[in-house]
Image (cartoon, grey):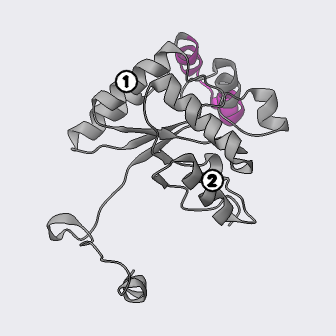
Amino acid sequence: IAILEVKFSGKYAFKPKWAGEKKAALALSHDVDYPEMIKSIEILRYIATHRFKSKITTVMDVITGKEHFWKFYDYIDLEKSYGAKSAFYFCPLKGNLLKYFLVAPDPFYDIRKSNFKKVAQSLIENDFEVGLHSSYFSYLSLEKFKNEKNLLEKAFEIEVLGNRHHYWHMNPENPAETAYIHQRSGLLYDSSISFEKH
């Protein structure tokens, strides 16, 4: 960071690194990939993983819903207990199992469902950020990207300022082109700070 400060010090005024002379900061975020358990898949996955050590009680917990992935309210309570506020990135493009294996590994959920709208409202009311988790091939065109952003804004009745690409899947040949799409879409930031294959 010091090298960057020296290089750009003549052009930009740098703010103090952290407020109150603190030495570090932590940014919490969640990619909402698989919030609703598909029971048949999870039972098969559990049995395949544990084989003869599989427990019928665990299988029954999945069947009855005692074991689940809908943990949003747990995260809210946990983070609030530490005085933290994170960002939750939702994908507006609903995939399916067939597309997952043949086309793109996009999430299976539907943000238009009432349970997603309710949890988004709860996150917003508790001052958590709700952002875009753009689909696997969203980087291919400005129109596709803007459409996903608009779908999320309409479903949750919010202005989307931030994004993280699913699997960090940006244009591997020209990441600057993806950044240009972000800018043209009206994003304030993108937190895809890595690349899928690098």
User: Residue 81: x percent and y percent?
Assistant: 21, 38
Residue displayed at 19% across by 68% down: 22
Q: Is residue 163 above or below residue 4?
A: above
Find numbered disc 2 in the image and state the secondary structure of the residue it sits on: helix
Q: Is residue 86 rendered to the left or right of residue 52?
A: left
Number of numbered labels in the structure image: 2
Front position in the image: 65 or 193: 193
Q: Residue furthest left?
A: 20
Quarter of the view holding residue 80: top left
Q: Is residue 5 rendered to the left or right of residue 47?
A: left
**Residue topped by disc 2:** 181
Q: Residue furthest right?
A: 102
Q: Is residue 61 rendered to the left or right of residue 42?
A: left
Label 2 neighbourhood size at 10 Å, few (<14), some (14-19), many (20+)? many
Q: What's the residue type where badge 2 is placed?
A: Ile
User: Residue 164: x percent and y percent?
Assistant: 54, 49
| Magenta region, residue range | 46-63
Label 1 neighbourhood size at 10 Å, few (<14), some (14-19), many (20+)? some
Front position in the image: 82 or 135: 135
Q: What's the residue type where badge 1 is placed?
A: Gln
Magenta span: chief secondary structure? helix
**Residue topped by disc 1:** 121
